[in-house]
Image: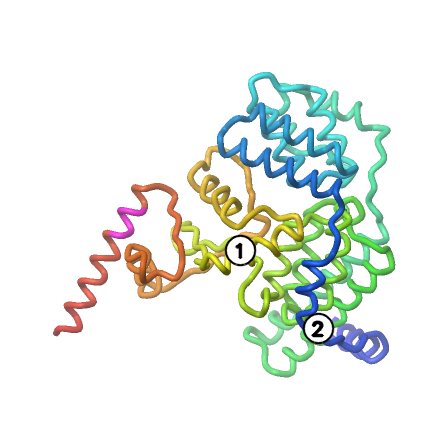
Amino acid sequence: MYKFFVIVILLFFINVLPAQKVFINEFDSIIINTNQQKHVQKYYNNIYKAEQFIIEENFDKASEAYFEAFKYIENPFEVDLLHALDCEQLRKNPQKTNVKFIVKKLYSKTGEIPIMFTEQPYNEVVGVDELEEYVKNQQHSRDTNFIRKIEYFHEIDQGIREEIIAEHGYPYDEFYKDTIQYLDSINYFKIIELINDYGYISEELIGGAKNLNSIHLIIVHNNKRKEIIPVLHKSVINGTLDARFFAGILDVCNYKIDNEFYISQSVWFINEGIFSSQKYSKKQLAKLNKYRKSIYLDSFNTFQDKIKWTIRNPQYYFNFATMNNQMYLSDEEFYSIILDNANKKKSEKFLYFKSDEQEKRILLRAKEWDLQKHNENEN
């Protein structure tokens, strides 16, 4: 099996791998100067209205805003359909026609009825049997050839890593590291070629949002490269690729506005589920929001407010973060950040806790740790 991968490397790397184009920050100007599609902008405007109603726990109004948004693009994004479905279950009088519309749109992406309809309260509005009858003649938009190729790239990405670890352990030595990097490069440029051949990428084409994870993984393994960014950007502007997913990719690729700071769509959690967020000056925040708006994102502060609401309301299943990241810190790193957060002037980050009680409890532990450290130094 390993010999097969070596052959693949030689054939593809020698004959297929395109020359890497120089990517400089002209993409800053591309982002700012590209004309948005008005119907796509109206879609996102209504989506953000719906999300605001959610954090106000006005699910009737949220549902209305979602269905207003769905008028503007043919294929609403999966995350918005699922949020609209949850709103429908939480509102005072769930509408069966709304639920059927959502299921129909989800089915067009995945070819499946959402699994939650096997459970309450979802099946109380409309049952699985009725939904199966409703969608049995519905055509899904998945392209099996596209999906097969993405699955193949994913298999190579994971297969070579699993085989090398099984035979030689981890971490990799330099030879195997180079082998993996060659394969990663091949996968990366083949995905760009595939998307360019089709002219766009969408959840419908790839078989649902979960299959975008394979592309995301390959981009993560090529996170110093930038060539895929303008390729995905075209689909974002035209409304076939979720801007929030794209913004997370920009963060993964270490794309920085003016080489200074990130788009900041990725969400970072540290120990004990605490949400950690970067601080920005007013000038930086104005520039950041200008760039965010140019790719249909809401303002940074509004986005942060939704994440804070989510971690304080775990009884709901809304997820406004496209990409969640976890960073585990040592006791010294963790308690130092906690103490810095208590000293607002010193802190470089905002920390948001699950509750006021959690914040008090962890701060007390941090102070005890700091006192013990001080006493040890004294001795």
Structural crowding at the residue carrying mark 2, measured as other residues with C-alpha within 10 Å and reported as few (<14), some (14–19) or many (≥20): few
Structural crowding at the residue carrying mark 1, measured as other residues with C-alpha within 10 Å and reported as few (<14), some (14–19) or many (≥20): some
Q: Is residue 325 visible?
A: yes
Q: Is residue 290 left or right of residue 16?
A: left
Q: Which mark is residue 286?
A: 1
Q: Which mark is residue 23?
A: 2
Q: Residue 315 location in percent, x, y?
A: 46, 33
Q: Residue 90 location in percent, x, y?
A: 55, 24
Q: Is residue 231 above or below residue 235?
A: below
Q: Which mark is residue 350?
A: none
Residue located at (73% from left, 68% from top): 227
Which sits in the foreground, 368 or 257?
257
Residue located at (63% from left, 64% from top): 220
Image quadrant in which the C terminus is located: bottom left
Q: Quadrant of residue 86?
A: top right
Q: Quadrant of residue 84?
A: top right
Which sits in the foreground, 110 or 258?
258
Q: Is residue 126 above or below residue 225?
A: above
Q: Amino acid at mark 1?
A: Ala
Residue located at (55% from left, 48% from top): 299
Q: Residue 349 location in percent, x, y?
A: 40, 58
Image quadrant in which the N terminus is located: bottom right
Residue located at (64% from left, 59% from top): 249
Q: Is residue 158 visible?
A: no
Which sits in the foreground, 336 or 342?
342
Q: Is residue 90 left or right of residue 75?
A: left
Q: CA distance from mark 1 to mark 2?
A: 25 Å
What span is in magenta? 359-363
Majority secondary structure of the magenta segment? helix
Q: Earlier in the sequence, mark 1 or mark 2?
A: 2
User: Given the current orientation, which residue lies at the most extreme bottom position?
Assistant: 175
Q: Residue 51 location in percent, x, y?
A: 57, 36
